[in-house]
Image (spheres, rainbow, N blue to C red):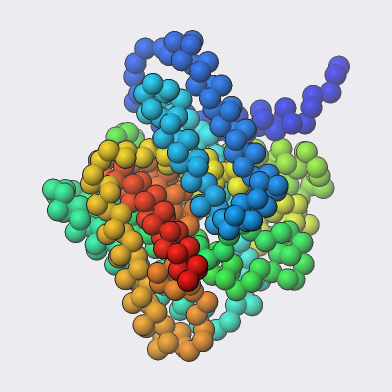
Amino acid sequence: MLPVPRWVVAVLVAAVGCASPHAAVTHVETGSAVPFGILAKTVLGLVLLMGLFWLGSHPRVRQFQEWLGIRQAITAGFAFVGLGLIASHPSIGILSGKVFYDLAPLIHFALGWLGMIIGFQFDVRVLDRLPRGTALEIALYTLAPFVVVGVVGAAVMLAYGRPWTDATFVRDAIVLATAGAIFASGTGDRPRPRDRFAGGDSDERHRLDQLDEIAAVAGLAVLGSFFRPQWVGFQWALSGSIWLLITLGVGVFVGLLAYAILTGGRRGAEFAALTLGSVALASGVAGYLMLPPLVVCFIAGAMLVNLPGDHRRRLWSVLTRFERPLYYLFLTLAGALWDVTDWRGWLLVPALVLSRAGGYLFADRLAPEIVGEGMSMRPAWFAAPVSVVSIAIVISAQTIYRGPAVPWIVTAVLGSAIVVELMSHRRARR
């Protein structure tokens, strides 16, 4: 009997783990079967996009981008936003509305992979080395823009005629505030495994980025637990606190299961296959329960990095290898969701940019009194770029929730990312 290639096992394990959320997300989508010609065009288009994601992540391409002065991962991926716009055009139909929801398993897997990366940064040994006042600084620079963006975004949506008594109104304001409160001071790339686990962790600014992302995951966990999707029915009538405990329990269970599997001395392709299967299992269960896969996999990743063993360096290497292609996937999906013809989303762009800047400026004024002089490693309030995690939050909201405000939020986040990037480049040339 011929041996089965290990990469085939990896694909099968990932497919089985991702299969469960498909029914939960698409069972409300009814209609006739998709013609073979459209199906073939969609599959070929998606394969081409995957190839472009991988090509855009090649070291030679990234060196060329750095030579052009493009260092932010989200800036380098603006071309993929355009690809998403083109792929979602009705005449092309590669990423149409129905195809987008049929791709729910892939989207959940990508969100889970990013959540695993963020969770793997929650190393208590690294947190112990942070200087005093870091926790206060993170709280200040996260809560200030969160509150300001949320209030301004809610005011704009009230002006659009959204009723404030609707539960989705508060939910959409929290989604916008969570996406707007995160900034990215680095390039979006994680430190190498030998730097992270050999006692020479990333610089201070990278650590602040990581803690910012962790704060965003906490907000997304509360959002997914207390604001359940209304377009799908559940037989479980549970409170938000119970859903939060279920989210924590699923993440801990999958983390312990993955730890038992990955610490068995496996290496190479077998280790990568088991990593794929672990993320697929966690994101699949989260998708079936309509919980944010990013949060569930974050908890699993935090378990894996804090438990003893020699698996951490290998696991970090596998996780970061696929990070850039996932960034480009998020940006392409955001482009497919982007309704450029809706003027309400464009009016949210200056509101998000100004409120975000106002929140950071307010935090800058309070930082010397709360944190102390010379403690802050934050960029200037006018040059705080939008994080790729903000795009992931928008994609996560789109897969779980439905409502008129979600396309507005997509436009606001993408538009503000472009505006802030142009502002920072113009400032740097002076």
- Taking the spot 44% from the left edge, 10% from the top edge, the residue there is 35
Most foreground residue, 281 or 117: 117
Q: Where is residue 168 shown, x and y percent of the image?
A: 24, 47
- Taking the spot 80% from the left edge, 42% from the top edge, the residue there is 268
Q: Where is residue 297 shown, x and y percent of the image?
A: 55, 49
Measured along the vertical axis of the image, is residue 347 above or below residue 138? Answer: above
Left or right placement of residue 416 versus residue 312 in this view: left
Q: Where is residue 352 shown, x and y percent of the image?
A: 31, 59
- Taking the spot 67% from the left edge, 61% from the top edge, the residue there is 191
Outermost residue toward the top in this view: 36
Left or right placement of residue 422 versus residue 54 in this view: left
Whether residue 28 is visible here, answered yes or no, is yes
Most foreground residue, 304 or 104: 104
Most foreground residue, 335 or 428: 428
**Count of numbered marks:** 0
Measured along the vertical axis of the image, is residue 84 above or below residue 202? Answer: above
Measured along the vertical axis of the image, is residue 135 above or below residue 11? Answer: below
Q: Where is residue 372 shown, x and y percent of the image?
A: 47, 88
Q: In the figure, residue 44 lies in which quadrant?
A: top right
Whether residue 230 is visible here, answered yes or no, is no
- Taking the spot 60% from the left edge, 74% from the top edge, the residue there is 204
Locate the N terminus and report the quarter of the image it occupies.
top right
Measured along the vertical axis of the image, is residue 18 above or below residue 147? Answer: above
Outermost residue toward the right in this view: 1
Most foreground residue, 10 or 368: 368
